[in-house]
Image: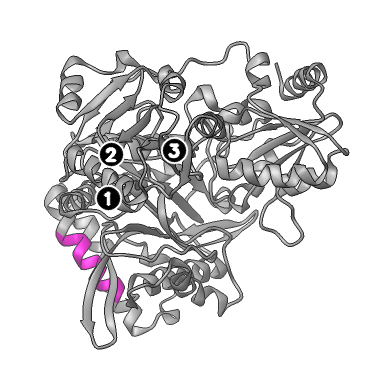
Amino acid sequence: MDITSRLLALREAMEREGLDAYIVSGTDPHNSEYLPEAWKQREWMSGFTGSFGTLVVLKDQAGLWTDSRYFIQAEKQLKNSGIQLHKLRMPGSLDYPEWLSSTLPQKGRVGLDCFCISVVEMKRLKKNIDIKEGKIVENIDLVGDIWLNRPELPNSPLFRIETGVDAKTKIAMVRHVLQKEKSDYFVFSALDEIAWLYNIRCNDILYNPVAISYAIVGMKDTHLFVKFDKVSKEIAEELKQDGVQIHDYCRISNFLNELPKEASCCIDVSTLNYALYHQITSRCSVKEVASPLVLSKAIKNKTEIEGFRAACVKDGVAMTKFFYWLERNICNHLTETEVSEQLTAMRACCSEYISDSFHNISAYGANAALPHYSALPGQDSRLEARGLYLVDSGGQYIHGTTDITRTVSLGELTRQEKEDYTIVLKGMIALSCAVFPEGTRGCNLDALARQPMWQTLRNFGHGTGHGIGFFLNVHEGPQSIRQDLKEQAILPGMVTSNEPGIYRENSHGIRHENMILCVPVGENEFGKWYGFETLTLCYFDTSALLLELLTEEEKKWINDYHKTVYQKLAPFLNQEEVCWLAKKTKEI
């Protein structure tokens, strides 16, 4: 069944249900960014494979909303599908709730699966539908009705890891919040939060070592809802010792229905799905409280920080071996996919490697102008001994997660390519060297990375930095470094990406990315001061630089960084690789 046939089948189902519009979300009951195959309903309906986007289908039109990371990709994937691309956060653009309020007929009926929409998103939708005196028909999974060969939910086994803080201590922290809020239970649905809380990991979702689950922490009892056959006797006993009772994943609704009617529940509306929210509010009193796990998870402890450092050494070795191999094989007409597979193989040589932390973005030439480009076998480009190659990748190691982007020269470059390359690196260096007072938000720091670009009338459309989990999701909050205001300050212990870029459609794309750790740098009469320690270890291709555009301070930063890269990686390389790395990291 092609996309046109799927849309036709959905519209027939809408007609039967008396619906004027149907919303197909791009997430799951846990508000996840990356999804198991069973919940890729938006991708199945539209053909759009990006990690962010919402599809809305009406009787005579359909639209898909996504952000600037995916504009070019979405235009290609939606071509001839009958689905119009709506570009979010552009001048004059409307998000889908606002668009529906202007497009839906008066008293129109809108359907959706409320398990796959967060409470906060549902409230925003209801506000806009109310303008038309419309009705939202909840919990109607029309995609499930027509997706006849829909995959089953995964069933990978649970395992536990050492994080420096045991589960009992984390549970006690949640109970302290409950006591403060005078509530009886805290309901958690975000998969990375649950994994962090109980020190469990799993392989249910590709690249994300989490288990499909729910968790409820009460003042006297603690619960984990997960498929029973995922939990071995040994893991069950360990969790029991931590006071965790295990229930089958499907029992969450029954459990909520059995809560005392006088009970008070804390929920995080940004992650809890609306279906469970509706069930809880129909029985218990509810307090909308930001999950305390988000910030606690973001501030890494000593064990986690040392794990990150160790993972970055292993990752740096893999990256060095990869670029050494690439330089010697560039004339073999390799495809982007073949090169990507080689990088994964290099990482897999490490015994602590578990998986990649996301699908490698292996992009040559004009393909790199798509920030989230995905090379497909048979449709990808072959690398040539000229121009720029960008690879954004990362690894999941048992003691840390990595995320790194490098853009390298494969041969002759244009003046513009070199200018862009140098200016992006200037932006990265500016953020790396930042010193800032306590309370500084990510949006305050974002301008540092963009200033070298703004001065030359250049810019990029994505954020500059996101949080990174400890052997968890490669994207996590609550902090971010981007132009949008987020109230969360950057705090010591937070690991964040530093990834400015420049993208020129049909020409080239450049991004440099390191992981940076926020650390204290001093305290005086003006307050506490913080800065960044760069964790990532991999050389920058100085042959692509225009040295006359660099200040002496910027050259010193590059030379000092390269000295560290060589010292930490050389002991793990063979003699030929050591000599090659010495040339790549020589002073400029």
Please state the horizontal and vertical placement of residue 110, each as a whole percent of the image. 75, 32
* Label 3 neighbour load within 10 Å: few <14, some 14-19, many 20+: some
* Label 2 neighbour load within 10 Å: few <14, some 14-19, many 20+: many
Q: CA distance from mark 2 to mark 1?
A: 35 Å
Which mark is on residue 197? 2
* Residue tagged 3: 359
Amino acid type, residue under disc 3 in the picture: His
Q: Is residue 190 visible?
A: no
In what quadrant of the picture does the C terminus appear?
Answer: bottom left
* Residue in front for this viewpoint, 534 or 443: 443
Which image quarter: residue 537? Answer: bottom left
User: Which residue lies at the image location 67% right of the left edge and 29% below the top edge?
Assistant: 112
Amino acid type, residue under disc 1 in the picture: Thr
* Residue in front for this viewpoint, 448 or 412: 448
Q: CA distance from mark 3 to mark 2?
A: 26 Å
- Mark with earlier residue (3, 2): 2
Please state the horizontal and vertical placement of residue 157, each as a whole percent of the image. 28, 20
User: Which residue lies at the image location 58% right of the left edge and 53% below the top edge?
Assistant: 369
Relative to residue 421, is residue 472 drawn left or right?
left
Amino acid type, residue under disc 2 in the picture: Leu
Relative to residue 327, is residue 26 drawn left or right?
right
**Mark 3 near mark 2, Cβ–Cβ under 8 Å?**
no
- Mark with earlier residue (1, 3): 1
For residue 102, above or below residue 90: above
Which mark is on residue 320? 1
Magenta residues, start to end: 557-567
